[in-house]
Amino acid sequence: MIVVVDERELVKDGYTSLFGREGVPSQGFDPSEFGDWVSTAADSDIDAVEAFLIGQGEKAMSLPRAIRDRSTAPVIAISDSPSLETTLAFFDCGVDDVVRKPVHPREILARAAAIRRRLKALVNFTDIGPIRVFSDGRDPEVQGEVFALPRRERRILEYLVSNRGRRVSKSQIFNAIYGVFDEDVEENVVESHISKLRKKLRKRLGFDPIDSKRFLGYCIDWS
């Protein structure tokens, strides 16, 4: 999920709509509301955020520090001004990158992915048994071969691997894949995606590496 913070409704609605067209869930906040949300939201909600976009607002410059108290996700500022002073002020307050309007959502997603790659330095993948999951959007590999998956199933596998050894609920998976505030999609859709993912893994591996327990959630691990 991408979080857009700007005091202008038109900007918030515009970006959330554009990200939606790219198949990426997003949510807009006014800066005065966002400070309270980022400090009190559940860890599972914060973990679902892939990047924060900070735009115009009286409190905008104070938000990156508040974000860093809860999340390591990329923080990107959207600047309406070509002023060097404004750009430097954003960097001074702790953002990872500054982009100038107009900017395409794909560029924002690419910049966020690049920041995440830098943060992970040389390690941009996670191995769990014969499964290798990448952090840059590539399809995973199973037993050294590309394991092509639809985007939702790939992101569920990435989320399970990032929480390896820990059981996660259907709600946590839904929030990570569709966004905390998506009211147009039923949470039960997660079960369908996981069922298809497990069937494909079982066919490739010969067994199902995802353990599920009613009311407790899902877990992937390798002994």
Image (tube, grey):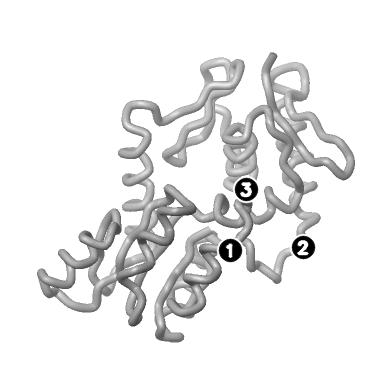
Disc 2: which residue: 186
Give the vertical position of 223 relative to 26 (above or below).
above
Q: Does residue 170 appear to the left or right of 18 in the view shown?
A: right
First in sequence: mark 3 or mark 2? 3
Q: In the image shown, does 206 or 56 lie closer to the viewer?
A: 56
Neighbor class of circle 1 (other Cα within 10 Å; few <14, some 14-19, many 20+) is: few
Q: Classify mark 1: helix, strand or loop.
A: helix
Neighbor class of circle 2 (other Cα within 10 Å; few <14, some 14-19, many 20+) is: few
From the image, state whether disc 1 or disc 2 is nearer to you. Answer: 1
Q: Classify mark 2: helix, strand or loop.
A: loop
From the image, state whether disc 3 or disc 1 is nearer to you. Answer: 1
Q: CA distance from mark 1 to mark 2?
A: 25 Å
Residue 152 numbered mark, or none: 3
Q: In the image shown, does 90 or 19 lie closer to the viewer?
A: 90
Q: Residue 212 at x, y = what percent?
A: 82, 34
Disc 1: which residue: 40
Q: Amino acid at mark 2?
A: Glu
Which residue is pictured at 46% across the width and 79% down the height? 32
Q: Does residue 53 appear to the left or right of 40 in the view shown?
A: left
Neighbor class of circle 3 (other Cα within 10 Å; few <14, some 14-19, many 20+) is: some
First in sequence: mark 3 or mark 1? 1
Which residue is pictured at 64% across the width and 42% down the height? 156
Name the residue furthest right.
214
Residue 215 numbered mark, or none: none
Q: Amino acid at mark 1?
A: Thr
First in sequence: mark 1 or mark 2? 1
Q: Classify mark 3: helix, strand or loop.
A: helix
Q: Is residue 109 visible?
A: yes
Which residue is pictured at 86% across the width and 36% down the height? 213
Q: CA distance from mark 3 to mark 2?
A: 14 Å
Q: CA distance from mark 3 to mark 1?
A: 28 Å
Q: Residue 157 at x, y = what percent?
A: 63, 36
